[in-house]
Amino acid sequence: MTSNQTIKHYPLSSPQLDFWFDQILHPNVPLYNIGGYVRIEGPIDPSLFEKALNHVIAENDALRIILHEGESLPTQTFAENIHLKLDFHDFSETENAHELALEWIQREFVKPFQLYDGLLFQFALCKAADNCYYWFGKYHHLIVDGWANSLIVQRVAAAYNALTTGQTGEQKNYAYPDFVQNDQAYLESEKFVKAKHYWQEKYREVPEPLMVRRYATKFQGQTIPSQRATLRLKRTFYNQLIDFAFKNKVSTFHVILGVLYCYFVRTCNREDLVIGFPTLNRSTASFKQTVGLFVGVTPAWLRFGTALSFVELIQAIKGELQQNYRHQRVPVSEINRHCGLATSYRQQLFEIELSYEKHDYDTHFDGSPAIVVNLMSGFNQNALTVFIREFHDEQDVQVDFDYSLLAFNEDKIELFKARFEFLLGEILRKPQVPIRSQQIMPLAELKKILVEWNNTTTDYPRDKTVVDLFEEQVAKTPNAIAVVFPSTSSGQDENQSVTYQQLNTKANQLAHYLQTLGVKPEVLVGICLERSVSMVIGLFGILKAGGAYLPLEPALPKARLAFMLEEAQVQVLLTQSSLKKELPETTARVVCLDIEAETLSHFAEENLASGVVPNNLAYVIYTSGSTGKPKGVMIQHQSLVNFVNTAIIEYGLTQNDRLLQFSSISFDAAAE
C-alpha cells in the first residue's frame, strides 16, 4: 500500500474522542474492532473486486483517516492517492474450506489495530469455492459506525457491479471533515450549553448501578472478555411486534426497550432502569450519505415503577425518549463526568445497551446474493448489549446478545434469551397486565422450577428402619471396625474401638434393659453423654429397643435441659456418673451407663423384636431458639433412612471409606 498524506490536521470529533479515550485506557485490546464479513454466494473476479474497493476508498475519506499523537489530544489527517493491493486467500482446494476461511477471518478480526500512523481498516477476500467467497472487512470504530458499514457494503457492491459491465462509476466525494467542523461548532454554541444543562438536571442524582457494584473490587482496572449469544426471531412473529407498535403509535424500538425494562426491574427488584442506546447523529441528508463515525450514545433513565401496564409503559418510554432526542448530541462522556463517574468504579451510567440496526443490506454482487455477518471482538464495555439486526425486510431478524463474563455466563445468558423471547410474546398476548404481574418465565422453565425440581422422589429402602440397615451391616461385616474413639489426655493410652458385632452386642444388651423400663415405639429416651463409644452404644440401644432418642448436650444450661426434658416428656435418661450432678431435676428414670455396666452385661446379646416400623420416631432435635422458644423437630425412621442413603450416594461412600464424626448429636449430620 502506498500513500501521499495531506498535511492538514483536524481535531477528532466528539464521538471519536469518546472512543479514543476508552481505547487508550485499554491498549492492545480489540475493544472497538467492528465489521465482519459478507458471504457472496457466487463467483467473484478478484481483480475487479480490488478495483471496486479502491474506488470506494477514494471517494470516502473516512477510510483514509490517519491518527497522529499530539501533546494532549491526537489529530487526524486524510491520506490521498492510496492504492490497496487486495489480500486474497484461496481455501477452495483444501478440505473444510469454509471452516478454514472463517477461522482465518475470526483470527484476523480480533487482532488490535495500531492506533497511530496507519490506516484503521483491513480488507481481504477469501475463496471457499468457485461459487462462494467471503469478503472480510474490519474497521476501528474511530472511523466507521454501523450505518457507515452498510454504506460501504452497498458502495463496494455497486462499484463491482458497474465494473462487471465495463463501467467505472462516477467518482464522488463524501467528506468527513464537514462533520468534524460541524461538531466543533456545536460544542461552542449556546445550544450545547442548554443541552448540557438538560442532562445535568436529569442526572442531578446519580442512579444506583444495576449489577456492576458486586464486581467492582474483584475486576477493577481489568478488561473483561465478552461472548455472544444469538436469537433468531421469525419474520412472521417480528411483523406482529411491528403491528403492535404501530397500533399503539410507538416504534418497535420502544417495544423492545419496554421488554428489557420489564425484565430487569422485575428480576433485579428495581423501580427504574438506565439503558443506553446509540443515536444516529446524522442531522443532514449529506451526513446520512457520509462514511465515518457519527453515532452517539444516549443514557435513558426510565423511572416508571412496576404498576403501569405494558401499553402505558411504552407510551411513557416514547415521551421520555422524545425529550432526550432533543439533546442527543451531548457526548455521553460529558454526562458521565457530571455524575462523577470518571474516577469511580463505574465507567458509565448504564450497564445495558440496546442497539436497533435497520440497515439496508439487500444487495448483490453481479447477481449473486450476499449475506452480511457482524462479528464481535470478544470485548464489550457493557454488561449486556442487545443488537436487533433487521437487515432484510423479508428475512428473519437476528438478535445478538453480547454479554460480559463479568455479569453473565453461558447458562445465564441462555436463560435470559429464553425469557426475552417469551416476554416478547407475552406482551402481545397480555399488553394490559401490570408490569409487576407480567409473567417472565417460559412455561418450560416454570414447570422445571415448580414441578421437576420439587420432584425429589428417590429410591431408598422405604420398608426398612435404621435398625434394619445396621443389623444387615453387622451380618455382612461382623469383624470390621465400626467405631474408633481416639485417645485423650485423660490418661487413656490407646484408641477405643469396637467391631460391628461388638457394637451390636452392647446395643442389644442395652435395648433389652431399656424395654424393661417401658421403652417402646414412640417413647422418647434422653441421652446426655460425652463423646465416646458408649454414646454410640447408647444411640443404637435406644433405637433397637424401639424408642427414639432426644440428644442433650452436657454443655447446655440446666434451664434449657430442663425445658427439653419436660416438654418432650422423657421417661428415661441415659447419662454417665460424671455428668449426673450437671443435670436438672427430672421425673425421668436416670440410667448411668458406667454404673450399670455390670447389670447390662447380664442381658441377652441377641437382636430383639421392637415392633418399630419406618414411620415411627427415630429422634427429636430442638431448634436453637434464636427466634423464639425452642421447638422440637420429630424425625421418623424413614426420613433418617432416606437421609443416610442420600449421603452414601452423594458422597460416593464405599466400605473402604472412613468418616470423621465431629458434629454434635443435636444436629442431623450426626446421624450419618
Image (tube, grey):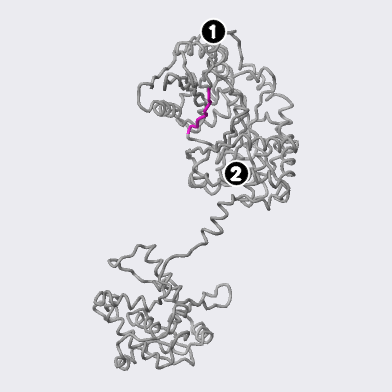
Which residue type does callout 1 highlight?
A: Thr
Q: Nearer the viewer, residue 635 or 496?
A: 635
Whether 371 is among the magenta residues is yes
Does residue 371 appear in this view? yes
Q: Which residue is mark 2?
A: 420
Disc 1, disc 2: CB below 8 Å?
A: no
Q: Which residue is mark 1?
A: 165
Whether 320 is among the magenta residues is no
Q: Nearer the viewer, residue 390 or 490?
A: 390
Dot 1 lies on which element?
Answer: loop
Instruction: Rate crowding at label 2 as few (under 14), some (14 to 19) or many (20 or more) other CA atoms within 10 Å.
Output: many
Q: Is residue 289 above or below residue 441?
A: above
Residue range (magenta)? 370-377
Q: Residue 63's spot in the image, x, y percent?
A: 54, 17
Compute the Cα span from label 1 to label 2.
Answer: 47 Å
Q: Between disc 1 and disc 2, whose residue precedes?
A: 1
